[in-house]
Image (cartoon, rainbow, N blue to C red):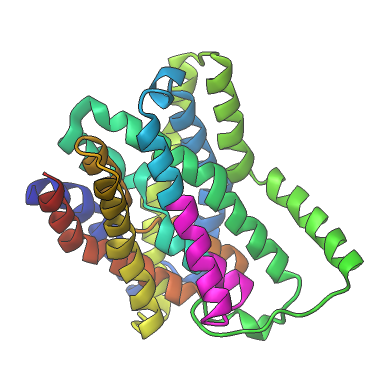
Amino acid sequence: MLDTILSALLPMVVTFLLGFVSAWRHDFGSKDASTLNRMVLQYAVPLALFAGTVMTSRKALSQDVPLIITLCVGIIGFYCVVFLFSRLVLHMQVSSSALAALTASAPAVPFVGPAVLGDLFGGLSAIPIAIASLVINLTVVPITILLLALDSTGRDSENKSSVLQAGRDSASAPKSYVSVFTGKLVETVKEPIVWAPVLAFVIVLSGLRIPQLIVHSLALLGHASGGVALFACGIVLASGKIKVNRYVLFFVFLKNIIQPALVMGGLRWMGYGNPVVSEAVLTTAIPAMPIVLMLALQYRVAQEEAASSVFLSVMGSIVTMGVFIALTH
């Protein structure tokens, strides 16, 4: 089991360190991280999401309804709870709360899933990977982008420094807010990272099949998305510093331990057993997505905290995933 976890997570750690070393050697800087971020969000990730989604069949999506419901509740429901907790209890800004919720609820299934779940479940791993990827990319990621875009219009640049610090949202008239909301909603829908998986999902539901040659051609750049995103994380960490404060540790704790523990407890309480329990628990036990940092860079919201959260989530998952594998097998 340890070999399976290390084979999936060690490359992520090494890529982090390569980015860190490259910035330490002054080969890359924070401006280069922004350029890499733009390439990832505008091209690599949308292509990866499109190619990965269109390869999913309708049969696979309808094969396991309990797993679909569990992952929807475990990801979307947990996102909503963490967002509301951040806003109402921790009094964080909207943008900060959105990034914190994405950190705590969205596992890096597209990047780590095939390696970890593939070794554990074989061909059956395609189902939880496809379902979790669709749930994340069709719901919590677009919602986070929309909230970041909305909040960016109502705060000063001085209030963009921390994803885990309290803040205040500027007030606006209802009519003005509706206008801003509509405009930002249109801008969000136009983002390739939003419409690409939606288009692919529509193609899957329609039963159309995209030729493998086209899918593989689109996926070539998409395969670079995870590595480039992690490399940029290392650059940001080297350009600033790792911020290990109580808020960063709290949201990493939510992602690595609380989310999969709640999924496991809920399924056990309802009387479910394996393979549903093991698939759902280990899918949600996967560490935070590198896209958290990509969005932090794009909207200039707590870049160092986002990079630290992703890095600590990956490092911590070497232990926490081992524990959940032992508990579910």
The percent position of residue 10, horizontal first and vertical second, equals 19, 55
Residue at 70% over, 45% down:
189
Q: Nearer the viewer, residue 139 or 245?
A: 139
Dominant SS in magenta: helix
The percent position of residue 228, horizontal first and vertical second, equals 40, 53
Residue at 48% over, 46% down:
136
Pick the quarter of the image with the C terminus: top left
Q: Which residues are magenta?
A: 75-98
Q: Residue furthest right?
A: 175
In screen coordinates, is 196 left or right of 292? right
The percent position of residue 235, horizontal first and vertical second, equals 40, 68
Report if residue 294 is visible in the image.
Answer: no
Q: Residue furthest front?
A: 270
Residue at 10% over, 51% down:
326
In screen coordinates, is 38 left or right of 173? left
Q: Nearer the viewer, residue 23 or 326?
A: 326
Residue at 61% over, 30% down:
199
Q: Nearer the viewer, residue 303 or 135?
A: 135
Please say whether residue 314 is one of the residues in the magenta stretch. Answer: no
Report if residue 54 is visible in the image.
Answer: yes
Q: Nearer the viewer, residue 328 or 145?
A: 328
